[in-house]
Amino acid sequence: MKQGMLWYDSQTAKDFYNRLNLAVTYFTEKYGFPPECCYVHPDMIKDIPKSESIIKVIADEKVLRNHIWMEFPIAEKSMASSLK
């Protein structure tokens, strides 16, 4: 996890992939490109098939529950740092 955007979503009643789609849509509209991958707490994705997501989702205990860390694509990192 180098550069990216942290998304908080407290709507735990919603399906995980609906929440992920909302975060990815926001990221894409803000920066003009989709995230390379997303890191989430393992509790957020347990018992859910991994094939449902277009974006690579990685479980990482360093990410707080109800948060999604979206990583900038490598080629876009230099451009993203100028958008801050």
Image (spheres, rainbow, N blue to C red):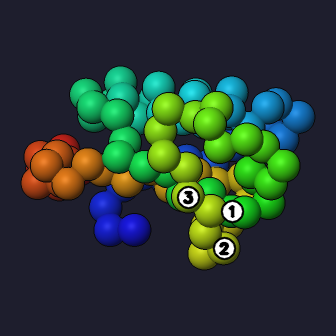
Residue 76 position, x and y percent, is 16, 46
Residue 8 position, x and y percent, is 63, 48
Name which residue lies at 82% across and 30% down: 14
The vertical placement of 28 against 6, above or below, is above
Which residue carries the number 1 mark? 41
Label of residue 58 in the image: 3
Report whether 77 appears left or right of 69: left
**Please, what is the three-letter code of the amino acid marked with disc 1?**
His
| Marks 1, 3: nearer the viewer | 3
Q: Check disc 2: other Cα within 10 Å, few if <14, some if 14-19, many if 20+.
A: few
First-in-chain label (2 vs 1): 1
Residue 35 position, x and y percent, is 37, 42
Q: Check disc 1: other Cα within 10 Å, few if <14, some if 14-19, many if 20+.
A: some
Label of residue 61 in the image: 2
Question: Contact, CB < 8 Å: mark 2 with mark 1?
Answer: yes
Name which residue lies at 41% across and 35% down: 27
In-front residue for pair 30/55 = 55
Quadrant in which the N terminus appears: bottom left
Instruction: Determine the secondary structure under disc 1.
Output: loop
First-in-chain label (1 vs 3): 1
Name which residue lies at 64% across and 32% down: 52
